[in-house]
Amino acid sequence: MTDTGTPAESRPAPVTLRMIAEQVGVSVSTVSRVLNAGDAEALRWASAQTVARIREYAAARAYRPNPHAASLRTSRSSLIGVLVPRLQDFVLATVYEGIDEAATENGFSTFVTNSLDDPASRAVRTEMMLQRRVEGMIFGDARDDDALLADLAARGVPFVLVSRRSADHASVTCDDLLGGTLVGRRLLEAGRRDLAVLAGLPFASTAIERTRGAVRAFADAGLRVPKERIAWGPFDAAGGREAAEKLLATEPYPDAIFATNDFAAIGAMGVLRDRGLRVPDDISLIGYNDTPLAAELPIPLTTVHSPMHEMGRHGVNLLIDVLGGADPESVRLDPTLIVRESG
Amino acid sequence: MTDTGTPAESRPAPVTLRMIAEQVGVSVSTVSRVLNAGDAEALRWASAQTVARIREYAAARAYRPNPHAASLRTSRSSLIGVLVPRLQDFVLATVYEGIDEAATENGFSTFVTNSLDDPASRAVRTEMMLQRRVEGMIFGDARDDDALLADLAARGVPFVLVSRRSADHASVTCDDLLGGTLVGRRLLEAGRRDLAVLAGLPFASTAIERTRGAVRAFADAGLRVPKERIAWGPFDAAGGREAAEKLLATEPYPDAIFATNDFAAIGAMGVLRDRGLRVPDDISLIGYNDTPLAAELPIPLTTVHSPMHEMGRHGVNLLIDVLGGADPESVRLDPTLIVRESG
DNA sequence: CTGAAAGCGCTTACAG
DNA sequence: CTGAAAGCGCTTACAG
């Protein structure tokens, strides 16, 4: 036997506008107007005394407007749909926290769900959100060549991208090309000449640009990074492990590894440990995102800090601009290199 | 200039039941009945031909019932509210993934938000969910002595708990007492005699029971764990670091540390590293939850596997039972010790 | 079997 | 300034 309170049948029916109107002795119109107005404006709709009585009664009975009724009437739902690759991923979870926070501040609620970067799943999930009448979408899982986004744009569905960008859709990103460049330069300064990259997912702008930045920095120093030194794969520990195993399958080994994600870097650490390779003595290792773990690892991880929470907050603001009909200006935030011991 | 598709004004108005009814030449009642019925049942409401025409038209125009209208009418929202301490936490993010998955399978959508384990914030967030007319709540942030839950139970709000339990409210948990016991026994087998615990949040059943299990195992072996060997604090790397610093402030050092969370264990690793203490030679270290990182760390982490995703899925099923008026049976799942190198 | 009608709880243009 | 009324898009008890 567990206690879950009184049975559903005994729950009091929610208070409605009509109940308040009857009690106070005014029309529902007046109650609606007063309750939706600020202090000053309310007096345009009723006497100070009536305003006070309406508010008192509403407060006493804990009146909560039925949002479904309001949505039906106004066809505004105050709902935002959010698609992320995976909430288990610290990076996207943090971006979502920023989204949820800013959404709440602006009177919106959010639906989030995982797409697992699967195109079919993305389409299905997006349709479910649209069915729920979200006013707009925020995508954290945009792809390089994104048919879904093209379709939504054609249909006039308002949306913005966070974290990853795609085509010329409105987006809030961190400057990943710069982030990659900072990593490349740092490694060069540390005397490294033979770079390998755990690049991340090949269809994600984050992966593509971080990789390009680092490779270009080496090229600028006259050092070519051959294709065999770049391994694509998921942004997590298992993905990092697999990619690292590929890169270290044959000698000579690289003298530096750049993982475009801290968790992938940790996966690589596991592989280096297994082979008895020391970090950074044998191989430098740099991650990306500056997760809270980075500083605590037995070998503290050099990484790139990116403003994940802020990206989420900006995403909401950008979406609100789009909903307001403004011509949206994409936002690109700055990354910071955090040097520790690993590279 | 960014491309966000055609302006909102040009978006086609959504298809309604009435539009379909007019096109097909039947009443909205019939359309509603047919569209809500299965193949067999539909024939009770219209001829095979009419059924086919209604469905074709609905499919062709991508009809999506307006959920706000349906909710208003039926006073069922198909919405579940979920409160977690923090989505950044891998453990709760994974539990939520299970919730979202099972909710979707059962025709529900979920709202999630962080409570940060703050009582005031929890109350506010819960009221917002209730205002949105969720049918029930799932709490991942229950407390030892939980006034909010008592209040909700008294008000007849349907809810269940996941991960943490409290009083006799319906819950889905992992057997934390057993998990702690497994850790204690393992450490004893490894010859450890002086246990310290990074216990976690003092008001969380998970923290309390895992700690109790380990301490009791030592007691059963005739070894007392004094109060000074137990440090409470947040379930994350920073919390683990702080608690570990407290435990290692004075000598003699313990010969084993149990962190009730893998991330806290990683924070402790940082402290041990800083002091030149070797794991497990000087001090054994065991974590909890078997996060994907555990196996990849330079010193692979011994930990306890808990079925987080499954806990979330069970939580939804339990809530559905409660909504159905059934007397809910709390679920307790089994943990598994995963022995690696750290302890 | 099928349709007309009521009504869920709001908001807001329209009258007075 | 305030109220009566319409209507958002559904579902479903009630008539025929």
Image (cartoon, coloured by chain):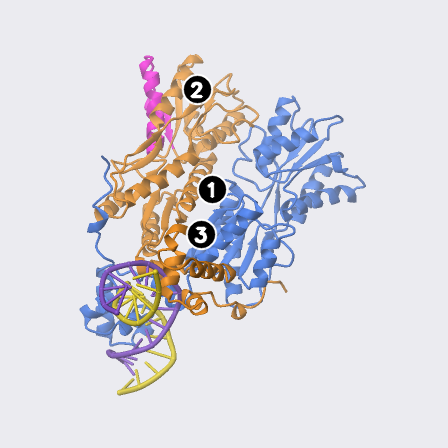
Chain colours: A blue, B orange, C yellow, D purple
Q: Give the structural element (helix, strand or loop) at label 3.
A: strand
User: Residue at label 2?
Assistant: B256
Quadrant of the rendering where the N terminus of chain A is positioned: top left
Predominant secondary structure in magenta?
A: helix
Q: Nearer the viewer, mark 2 or mark 3?
A: 3
User: Residue at label 3?
Assistant: A111
Q: Give the structural element (helix, strand or loop) at label 2.
A: strand
Percent coordinates x, y for residue A138 in the rendering = 52, 55
C-alpha separation, residue under disc 2 versus residue under disc 1? 28 Å
Q: Give the structural element (helix, strand or loop) at label 1.
A: loop
Query: Relative to A301, is A139 above or below?
Result: below
Amino acid identity at mark 2: Ala
Quadrant of the rendering where the C terminus of chain A is positioned: top right
Viewer-proximal residue among A3 and B11: B11
Viewer-proximal residue among B139 and B185: B139
Amino acid identity at mark 1: Gln
Q: Chain of mark 1?
A: B
Amino acid identity at mark 3: Phe
Q: Give, as a single range, the part of the protein colored magenta.
A: B205-232
Could you tell whether A43 is left or right of A77 in the image? left
Disc sitting over residue B88 in the figure: 1
Viewer-proximal residue among B292 and A153: A153
C-alpha separation, residue under disc 3 versus residue under disc 1? 17 Å
Crowd tier of the residue under label 1, counting other residues whose Cα lies within 10 Å: few below 14, some 14–19, many 20 or above: many
